[in-house]
Image (cartoon, rainbow, N blue to C red):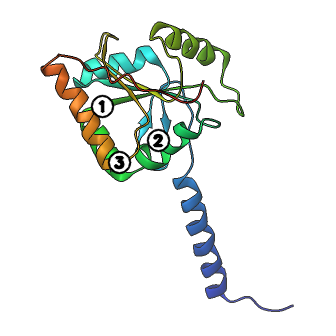
Amino acid sequence: MPRISTGFIIGGLVGFFAVFNVACDNLVVNGRNGNETGNGLTWMTDYEAALERAEEVGRPVLVNFTGSDWCPPCIRLEAEVFSQPEFRRFAEKELVLLIVDFPRRKELPSELQQQNQELAERYGIRGFPTIVLLNHEGAVIGQTGYRPGGVEKYVEHLEGLLEKVTNPSSGIDNPQPSCH
């Protein structure tokens, strides 16, 4: 029987754990109060919990109404903005994140589907993506959608909407979402 060296075994284990670690970095952990994405952001899924968190930390809620697995502008917004380190740094300081998803290829728990439908009706969502900024009481303080230009321009745009909260002429951007 051939003899396997200790170095070979250790090297194999190191390789296995390196691959395992990379795979875990992209893992999405689903839970009632949040989905942690590979870039370290936590997107809550429970509306009431997000409002409570917003009140605790004194930040607005960014609600992402999305068709995450079928809507091209939603997928671009995720890739170009939400998955970027610049957005993560901004969101960690300024926002509570809530995702309200309407996927077609995966099934959400019925309680979550019902909540998401009620929220879409409450906030008059007509297409995806629609981004709504809320205060801790659930009142709309801004609304937008997908905007080309990348993460830096999108963060500037969100900062402008948040600025309108302290100088409230209008925080509604009236986007023209393209997925219905």
Classed neighbour count for the residue bearing mark 3: other residues with Cα under 10 Å, few (<14), some (14–19), many (≥20): many
Q: Is residue 40 visible?
A: no
> Which of labels 3 and 1 is toward the front?
3
Q: Which mark is residue 95?
A: 1
Q: Which residue is mark 3?
A: 151
Closer-to-camera residue (105/9): 105
The total of numbered circles placed on residues is 3
Classify the position of the C terminus by image quarter: top right
| Amino acid type assigned to the residue bearing label 1 in the image | Leu
Give the side of residue 84 with respect to residue 160, left or right. right
Up-down relation of residue 103 to residue 54 (above or below) = below
Q: Residue furthest bottom?
A: 2
Q: In percent of the image, x 53 and y 27: which residue is there? A: 128
Closer-to-camera residue (53/160): 160
Q: Which mark is residue 77?
A: 2
| Residue 63 percent across, percent down from the top left | 41, 25
| Residue 94 percent across, percent down from the top left | 25, 34
Q: In percent of the image, x 55 and y 52: which residue is there? A: 26
| Amino acid type assigned to the residue bearing label 2 in the image | Leu
Q: Is residue 96 visible?
A: yes
Classify the position of the N terminus by image quarter: bottom right
Tell me which label, 3 or 2, sits earlier in the chain.
2
Tell me which label, 1 or 2, sits earlier in the chain.
2
- As measured in the structure, the alpha-carbon distance from the residue carrying label 3 to the one carrying label 2 is 9 Å
| Residue 2 percent across, percent down from the top left | 82, 92
Q: Which quadrant of the view contains residue 144?
A: top left
> Which of labels 1 and 2 is toward the front?
2
| Amino acid type assigned to the residue bearing label 3 in the image | Val
Closer-to-camera residue (53/113): 113
